[in-house]
Amino acid sequence: IMKMNQSFYLKNILQKFGMENCKPRSTPCEMNLSSYEADSSDDISDEKKYREMVGSLVYAMMCTRPDLCYVVTKLSQHLSKPTSGDWIILKHVFQYIKGTMDYSLTFHKSELNLFAFCDADWASSLDGRRSISGYCFMSSKNGPVISWKSKKQNSVALSTCEAEYMSLSATCQEAAYLCQLLKDILKQTFEPVVIKNDNQGAIALCKNPVKHMKTKHIDIRYHFVRDYYQSKRIILQYVPSNENLADVFTKPVRRPTLQKFKSYLFYI
């Protein structure tokens, strides 16, 4: 068993920003973040401190804390002009860290295979109505995650199916990178990669090469997902929304959902 955590680093940043005695929270953020986004009338005075705090969270999120991925991505979108609402969300994250400093990525000896979950939250961003893509990869069915990402999409999706299709595209790019990396290190082939998604329309769109009136406008760059599927480099599987681990990377989740996915994120 090998464990990876940043408890010492997290304790230091809590002390650095005067949050060591804060009250712990059970979730990384509130469920309704849009109410804070709408509150953009007043900017906070100390923008430098805001950027320092978000930057310290980015380092933790990228290394060992996938549960912070969504909220840190949201906070990072307002580095140039943060508002009082952003400040409230940021303090909430530090309160969550206060109660979860012992979270560790726990790796057990097992057969190495790649599994992925991907999801999208359609038109969730009030700023331009672009969707949020999220994905995560695991090296075994039980976890923990070895790669994760949450990102605002580059263009506006006109439907949930289209947003999920774009998310699949980003997931395939990461799958190609991880397969090549593992092949170079271990001299083994890890394709096809199983990718699980909760939108049957997006899965059908990948499997059916026929053009439809409602999808013909989708940019060419996203259609390489079909090539990956037809060349059997990926296997697409449907998973119910309440079992889709990638939900954690696309939207705020309630405490029971976070606790349910905790064992897969960290393999606790």
Image: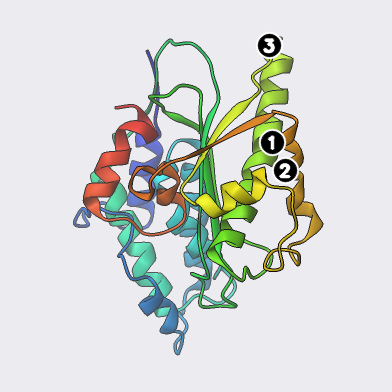
Judging from the image, what secondary structure is the residue with disc 2 in? helix
Number of on-image labels: 3
- Image coordinates of residue 207 in percent, x first then y, are 65, 43
> Quick check: 229 left or right of 245?
right
Q: Earlier in the sequence, mark 3 or mark 1?
A: 3
The amino acid marked with disc number 2 is Arg
Where is residue 141 shown, x and y percent of the image? Answer: 42, 24
Q: Secondary structure at mark 3?
A: loop
List the residue tagged with mark 1.
229
Q: Residues within 10 Å of mark 3 (few under 14, many from 20)?
A: few
Q: Where residue 226 is drawn, which disc sits there?
A: 2
Measured in 3D between alpha carbons, the distance from the residue under mark 2 to the one under mark 3, in whole angstroms, is 24 Å
| Side of 227 where 157 appears, left or right | left
Do the CB atoms of the residues marked 2 and 1 lie less than 8 Å apart?
yes
Amino acid type indicated by mark 3: Gln
Residue 182, position as x, y percentages in the image: 66, 19
Q: Does 217 appear above or below 15?
A: below
